[in-house]
Image (cartoon, rainbow, N blue to C red):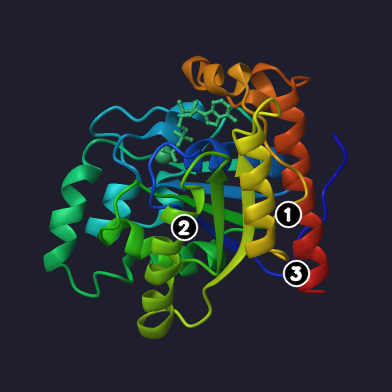
Amino acid sequence: YPRLPAPPAPRVFVVANQKGGVGKTTTSVNIAAALAQGGLSVLVIDLDPQGNASTALGVDHHAGTPGTYEVLIHGHSIADHVVTSPESPGLQVLPATVDLAGAEIELVSVVARENRLLRAIKRYLKEAAVDYVFLDCPPSLGLLTLNALVAAGEILIPIQCEYYALEGVSQLMNTIGLVKGELNDDLKVSTVLLTMFDARTRLAAQVVDEVRAHFTEETLRNVIPRSVRISEAPSYGQTVLTYHPDSAGAVSYREAATEIAHRGAKEQA
Ligand code: ADP
Ligand code: MG
């Protein structure tokens, strides 16, 4: 695949949408893998105790595997626990295990509880050459997601082409507003990606129009289709890019990643 341009400074994305099942994890892993396969250096931090991103990237995350939990709660460095994904030598993963479920509560009594991830990432960026970081969040809006919103510079919102798509997003925008004001002035919604598009329904086309009207600059031109290949890939511990590289889903994720890379190279140049 053609090489993608590197951003002038590392870009840290939180992939967020308060609704569950909208394609956050699928988007995190496929965009990250596509950028890495394009020659860039990428880190995925799995912040969901379910560890779906770790699974999809072919990385072990049985209970007790060191990863995000140790970084957030014990202050370990990210570099000590990252694992290279079989997807690409340029793709590092900080795995999440079920232990992370307890972190939500344990964090409450930890010093600087909203800044733990930010500090760990800053330290890692000094130690390693990284172009992109993707933070895959759990569906809830607890301290794990808050840590991600504080640590990120950009928000990537995947929006499912279904009824009430924008409703969950307006809740998210309120949350982002609060975080911006109190904890992270630099946070901005830079990227919106339409997912699970079904060309056969008029509803999907309407949602696309609505989202483009609302997020004119942010919405990527490329839309991710609903595709069985995309949903099957994680059960093989792969992204769709590796599972079925020529499928429509793989092509669309590669194109979305290419758009993100070109925008980042241009915007900050
Ligand atoms: P979230 O992380 O927001 O909860 P996921 O990425 O886990 O959402 O996606 C929810 C479900 O939808 C998963 O089973 C996933 O495989 C499936 N899925 C995601 N994107 C697509 C797509 N474009 N086409 C078909 N299924 C998809
Ligand atoms: Mg998920």
Which amino acid does the dot numbered 3 rest on?
Pro
Answer yes or no: disc 3 within 8 Å of ligand 1. Answer: no
Measured from the top left, where is residue 29 in percent x and y? 56, 38
**Residue 260's mark?**
1
Residue 100, picture quadrant: top left
Q: What residue is disc 3 on?
A: 8
Which amino acid does the dot numbered 2 rest on?
Val
Measured from the top left, where is residue 167 in percent x and y? 44, 55
User: Which residue lies at the image location 50% right of the left edge and 66% below the top edge?
Assistant: 152
Q: How far apart are marks 3 and 1 (CA)?
A: 13 Å
Q: In this view, does 80 lie above or below 14?
A: above
Dot 3 or dot 1, earlier in sequence: 3
Q: What element carries label 1?
A: helix
Can residue 41 be spotted in the picture? yes
Depth check: give the residue in front, 88 or 139: 139
User: Which residue lies at the image location 69% right of the left edge and 51% below the top edge?
Assistant: 209
**Residue 169's mark?**
2
Q: How many C-alpha atoms fall within 10 Å of the one at disc 2: few (<14), some, or many (≥20)?
A: some
Q: What element carries label 2?
A: helix
